[in-house]
Structure formats: structure tokens, C-alpha cells
């Protein structure tokens, strides 16, 4: 199989370039090896960039930093103690007002867990997880209908200009992070009600459609994302209405118009995987019309669990921080 990193940009379609964009860290940064594995209770749960590491060095009682890895102090034995100690650090860093990601503090926590067995280790504010390269989870909903003359049409939302992240950018119909204490379907039901006023019998039409995973990087940090995807076929007469102030407007576009919108800087980069996955599953993007079809499909399902399947024993015995990332 041809190595994904060897495909020349000159041979890539626009959609393949987009897939590379939302996987920029997976295809480039990960292989540079400059990030240190972040371990909690002996398990790798993230990666930490050098620009973040310099701040953590001022908290030696909380973070043990070696030449190979960063470890949350193993003296913190349980979920509550780990959560409390990390929260103290984050609040101190937030007061310094130097870290871009923490300026978008959310007062909503994401869970930090082991890769495969999903053992809960601690929680932290969702604005901070990108500083540690911690896997985060969310739900995304494709709202669509079949127009009698235009064919497949898809609802997109424009995010509020007051959102902490990606303000004013176009995005898929509904999305939201998986906060501590909420289940996957529960989050989907909550988000479609809040963002698009989908309630009652209509919400029962939510259909689980797998997930997408990708590894993005921005100036804010590292984003190993898994989105649980739902499809929702909507009546032609339904018009979504925002109820929580987080959406500026909605627009119903044809499949072709959606693709063109996704290729512009006005579209949220990390919303594109959900749209591409939907169009692939519906046959709109297929091997006959997309020369990089297999490449794109692979980049919608990057192996995040395998990337973080290191343990303290693996790292110290091999002396190779990339041993599970190749």
C-alpha cells in the first residue's frame, strides 16, 4: 500500500487536500517526534507540545517531566484528586492569560480515560484538553432531505460570531462535545433540541451512522477527535430554529453546494470530516468521481486508539516515544 505521506499535493484532488488539512498533525506533526507522551496512572492519554511544556515545568509537584515523557504525579491516586490538582494548575495558567486555548474557558468538562478499556482517570475543562493532546469526543448530526428537483440537500449551520471557537464559520447541521455525565445519544438529543429545535417525534428519527476520527492541529493545540455521527432525514417543510444562541443561521444546500462551501476558508475545518463521510456513504463521493477516494476514506478513520496505546513500561523499556505511533 502506498504510504499516505508520499502522495504529492500536485496529484491530490481538492477534497484530498481538505482531508490532509484536518489531519495535519497525523500526517506531519506526529512523525516529527517533538511532542512528549502524557501519561496518567501509567497510561498514555495524550501528547504535549514544547510550547505547552514550558508552562508545565513550573508545576513540578503536579507534573513529572523526563526526557521521554510527561507524567501526572502518580501520588494522585483517584479521579477526584487528579481532577482537582490539574484544575488548580489550569486556573493558575488561566490567570496569567498567556495561553490562547485557555482564553476560551468553557466551564464544561471532558473526561480523560484510557484508550481501549475506557477507565475514567480524571476530567478537565474542554478548553484545556488540546493543550495535552487528549482525545476528545463529540456528536455530529447530518440533517438532510431529498428535494424533488434538486436531489440530496443538506442543512448547514453558521456558528454564532460569539462562539469561543470557529466563530462565524459554516458547520454541519448540529454538533456538540461529549461532556462528563452525558451519554452519546443523550448528547445528540440535547444538541439537536438546543441548536435546531428538533424535538418530539422528529428526534426519534435520529439514525446512528458510525463515527469519524482525525487528528488536527492549530495554534490552540492538538485535537485527536472522534465524532459519533447521526443522520436525520427531515421533512421538506421543516425549518431549523436555534434555541441556545450558538447558531447565527441555517442554510439548505445541494450536495454540490455543500462540497464547494466546505472547500472555502469560511467552513469549519474540523466539521468537514462529517460532511465528507456523509457524502461518501450516500454515494455522492465515490471511486468513479474521486481519484483519491481510498486516501480520503482512510483519513476519515485514523487509528487514534492505537496511537495512544503506550504505557509507561513501553516508553521506558524501548526508549522510543514513537513506538506506538508508527
Image (cartoon, helix red, strand yellow):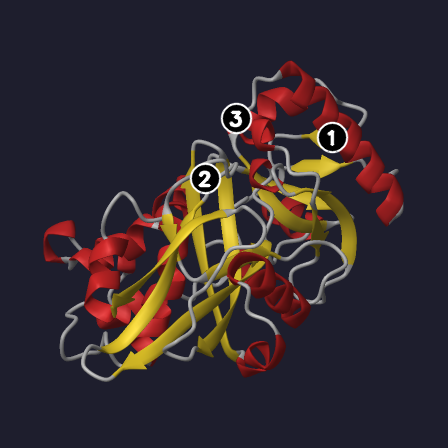
Q: Quadrant of the C terminus?
A: bottom left
The spot of residue 272 in percent (x, y) is 35, 57
Residue that appears at 68% across and 53% down:
311
Tell which circle, 3 or 1, labels the residue nearer the N-terminal end: 1
Q: Is residue 11 left or right of residue 304?
A: left
Residue annotated with mark 3: 100
Q: Which residue extends farthest left?
A: 10
Q: Local crowd at mark 1 within 10 Å, few (<14), some, or many (≥20)?
A: many
Disc 2 crowd rating (10 Å Cα; few below 14, some 14-19, many 20+) is some
Question: Label 1 vs label 2: CA separation?
Answer: 20 Å
| Residue 19 horizontal/vertical position (percent) | 30, 57
On the picture, is 232 further left or further right than 56? left
Residue 153 location, quadrant: bottom left
Seen in the picture, residue 60 relative to 296 is either above or below; the reply is: above
Label 2 to label 3: alpha-carbon separation: 23 Å
Identify the residue shown where x is 74% and y is 54%.
180
Position of 106 compared to 287: left or right? right
**What secondary structure is found at the residue carrying circle 2?**
loop
Which residue is rendered at x = 44% and y = 51% of the image? Answer: 215
Mark 2 or mark 3, which is nearer to you? 3
Question: Dot 1 lies on which element?
Answer: strand
User: Is tag 1's residue or tag 2's residue first in the polypeptide sequence?
Assistant: 2
Which label lies toward us, 3 or 1? 3
Q: 49 above or below 54?
A: below
Earlier along the polypeptide chain: callout 2 or callout 3? 2
Q: Do the residues bearing badges 3 and 1 touch, measured as CB atoms within 8 Å?
A: no
Q: Which residue is mark 2?
A: 33
In contact (CB < 8 Å): disc 1 and disc 2: no
Give whichever of 187, 132 is nearer the camera: 187
Q: Name the spot of residue 23 as percent of width and height, x first.
A: 37, 52
Left or right of 222: which side holds 54?
right
Residue ID for mark 1: 63
Amino acid at each position: 500500500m502506498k504510504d499516505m505521506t508520499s502522495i504529492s499535493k500536485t496529484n491530490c484532488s481538492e477534497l484530498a487536500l481538505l482531508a490532509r488539512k484536518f489531519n495535519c498533525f497525523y500526517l506531519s506533526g506526529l512523525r516529527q517526534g517533538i511532542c512528549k507522551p502524557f501519561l496518567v496512572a501509567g497510561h498514555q492519554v495524550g501528547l504535549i507540545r514544547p510550547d505547552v511544556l514550558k508552562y508545565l515545568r513550573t508545576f513540578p509537584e503536579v507534573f513529572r517531566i523526563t526526557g521521554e515523557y510527561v507524567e501526572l504525579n502518580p501520588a494522585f491516586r483517584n479521579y477526584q484528586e487528579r481532577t482537582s490538582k490539574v484544575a488548580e494548575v489550569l486556573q493558575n495558567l488561566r490567570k496569567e492569560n498567556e495561553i490562547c486555548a485557555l482564553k476560551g474557558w468553557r466551564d464544561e468538562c471532558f473526561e480523560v480515560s484510557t484508550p481501549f478499556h475506557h477507565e475514567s482517570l480524571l476530567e478537565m475543562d474542554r478548553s484545556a484538553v488540546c493543550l495535552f493532546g487528549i482525545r476528545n469526543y463529540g456528536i455530529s448530526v447530518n440533517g438532510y432531505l431529498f428535494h424533488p428537483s434538486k436531489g440530496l440537500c443538506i442543512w448547514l449551520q453558521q456558528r454564532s460570531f460569539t462562539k469561543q471557537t470557529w466563530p462565524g464559520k459554516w458547520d454541519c447541521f448540529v454538533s456538540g462535545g461529549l461532556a462528563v455525565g452525558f451519554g452519546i445519544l443523550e448528547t445528540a438529543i440535547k444538541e439537536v433540541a438546543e441548536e435546531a429545535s428538533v424535538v418530539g417525534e422528529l428526534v426519534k428519527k435520529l439514525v446512528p451512522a458510525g463515527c469519524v476520527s482525525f487528528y488536527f492541529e492549530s495554534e490552540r493545540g492538538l485535537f485527536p477527535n472522534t465524532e459519533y455521527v447521526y443522520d436525520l432525514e427531515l421533512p421538506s417543510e421543516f425549518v431549523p430554529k436555534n434555541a441556545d444562541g450558538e447558531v447565527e443561521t441555517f442554510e439548505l444546500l445541494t450536495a454540490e453546494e455543500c462540497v464547494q462551501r466546505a472547500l472555502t476558508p469560511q467552513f469549519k475545518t474540523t466539521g468537514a470530516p462529517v460532511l465528507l463521510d456523509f457524502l461518501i456513504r450516500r454515494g455522492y463521493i465515490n471511486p468513479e468521481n474521486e481519484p483519491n477516494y481510498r486516501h480520503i476514506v482512510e483519513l476519515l478513520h485514523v487509528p487514534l486508539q492505537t496511537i495512544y496505546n503506550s504505557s509507561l513500561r513501553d516508553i521506558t523499556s524501548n526508549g522510543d516515544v514513537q513506538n506506538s505511533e508508527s
